[in-house]
Amino acid sequence: MRAVDPWSMENRMRRTFALLATTLLASPALAQSAGNMPVQSARNNFAQSAGTMPVQSGRTDVAQGAAPMSAQSAGTVSTQTAPSVATSNGATVSGQGASDLQLNDVVVTATRVPTPLEQIPASISVVDRQTIEVNDYNTLTDALASIPGIRVSSAGGPGGQASVFIRGTNSNHVLVLRDGMPINDASEANGAFNFGVDTLSDIERIEVIRGPMAAVYGSGAIGGVINLISRQGKEPGFHVTGDLQGGYPAQVRGAVVASGVQGPIDYAATLESQSQTGWDAVPERMSVYTGKPQGFRDRVGTLNLGYTPIEGTRLSLFLRGQQAFFGFNNLGFPTFDNSNSTGQTDSLMGRVGVTSKMFGGVYETGLFVGRLQDDRQYLQWLNPADPNQAEGNSRYHSYRTDVQWNNTIHLDDALPAALSASALTFGYEYTEDTAKVRVNTSSFGSVFAQDANASMTTNAAYAGLQTTLWQRLTLTGQVRQDWVGSNAPTTWRLGSAVEVPEILTRFKAAYGTAFRAPSLFDRYGIDSFGYVGNPSLKPEEAQGWEVGFVTTLPGAGRTDFVSFGATYFNQQVQNLITTVFSPVYTAVNIGSAHIQGVETELTLRPARWLTLRASWTFTDAQNADDGTRLLRRPQNTGSVNATITPIAGLSIAPELLYTGAFRDYLYGNDSLGIGNGTSQQGLLANLTVTYEVKPGVQLYANGRNIFDSRFEPVNGYQTPGASAVAGIRIKL
């Protein structure tokens, strides 16, 4: 085990950042732009999951929004591009230029068929490579933070536990895919994905689908799906991209990507390494604050290789390895800022496949076999000053084998002329998960142990149909049958999108069902406090629907001067898994939740050099049994960002992220827990400036949290302080 070596803390740069922001905001172009959670009664915990942290008790992390628990409480950037542009169906296309917006840009994740955005009856956001670079997003949480309907809940900076809530559902109701393969960690006690360690150097595009999607992808897709699409060689010849940056507090990141197409071979190879001092995640207001930072280091290597022996057929090989080292705070009880805790994650993924187009492209088929291995270790060294006398060594290992056979039949030639873009999809998926968990911690001399060693297989068959009538009305439908152990949930989804050009508006509506199978720990885990898993658990179930519109109006000589859209969503979740004592601690299906809300988006393009975007989401997420609000789900969240290109080659991208007040377990300034209450709102400001010195060479600077906000996205865990980096990006 290698621990993170934190550097000493430099003085804060608050005045420098404030001066920089003030100077930029005064320019003519910009003048026109606007933790730890104690054990609670199981009855009050369901529907509140925020993900789990390293040392965890199976009794508490199943459904309660837990932060770290003690052993006791358990490609090329164009300077004319806009980071996101609302399309005519309520989708957000990130990285599309304000002057060259393509409404027929396609998305694969929503229906498994490449489909123009305006024909998809779902709420979709896309973060493409241009957006990542224009905003200098480094981590997955950076890229997701401004998307409507998404709430990112991070316990510190990179390496800290980070959960994502989509439309107020639990964090384990978000299914994460890598090029279509599910990658949620089976050794996580509640099955949630940890968004805290993933970086973006090998990502070409992120597609986010909000709403129930289990009819397409199966277990876990209750709140939505996030598909991480890897970089792939597209352009003939050999191309190299290099990115090197460094800044304050002491941090450095380097990445190189080699890609291209040589005859029948396409390839993309990525290498990344970064290291940063980080910040102390404990809020400065708390009496136990020490200022000792939690650092982060990672190494990533990816190879995406393809061979096309004949036109229409491609053999593929994908390999990825990631290793990360980081510090974290395990506050304990009584609360103590223990900076002796370190973690390490190792992830290996391999996938082989073949895709082929037959009968003139009428029939497309693909067969893929993937293997994923995740290994995590968390060490907490004894600190003599710690009143808890806490120490631990916990290991988590998970293994996943995923086999997919995916098929599409294009039906246009067999249907009347009134129908277009018609396709039938069908396929089969086999998944086998294995988890091995060994948790060993102690506090006050009392030992806590947790164990799980189990496997589970899932078989599934699915089918879908989509068509467009009279070039105006698009209809989609999907159905899927899963067999998970002794359970056999059936899910389905129907949707429609209609264009009404007479009023410059598109409407959409969708209804779907979804489920989440119990995790391996839910079924088979045990711990020394008496928890025993329940093999008879049923899947969590959900039903959800949405309706929405987007209107695009001309003005100032543009056809897309302003776009405004709104979507209402409503979702019921039943059979939520929580823990009760009867007569031992075990998991049961007793919880339910009702979630509804509205997502709104506005895009304004008053000039060729200026695009402004704003979004606001209202979410009412309640425990349906007692009416209390679910933890860490703010009613109000919003973002404002812009792309400003006042002169050729210069891009300025400011970003504001607002999180309203939310219910959470609170810590007082004296560092003592004071129970559930209202955690305060927060506003973060980021700014990226990019200048193209010459074609293929860019200099950039990025400031995150430039006004040094002390917002706590999880009460008891402060957002990283103000940081600044400068870098160079070369593309050959």
Image (tube, helix red, strand yellow):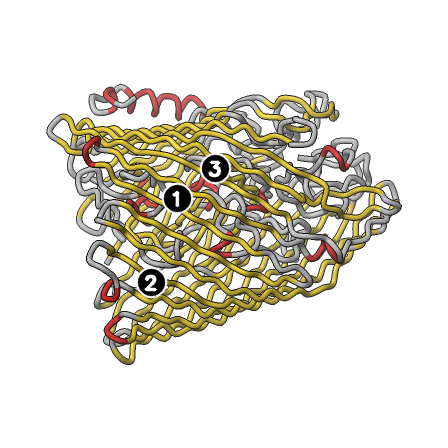
CA–CA distance in space, label 2 to label 1: 26 Å
Which circle's residue, 2 or 3, is located before the other in the chain? 3
Residue 362: percent from left, percent from top: 28, 70
| Amino acid residing under circle 2 | Gln
Numbered label attached to residue 122: 1
Name the residue tied to disc 3. 150
Few, some or many C-alpha atoms within 10 Å of disc 3 (few <14, some 14-19, many ≥20)?
many
**Residue 708 seen in the current view:** yes
Residue in the image at 37% along x and 43% along y? 125
- The quadrant in which the N terminus is found is bottom right
The one nearer the camera, 389 or 54, is 54
| Amino acid residing under circle 1 | Ala
Residue in the image at 29% along x and 80% along y? 309
CA–CA distance in space, label 1 to label 3: 15 Å
Name the residue tied to disc 2. 232
Residue 39: percent from left, percent from top: 77, 36
Residue in the image at 32% along x and 37% along y? 507
CA–CA distance in space, label 2 to label 3: 27 Å
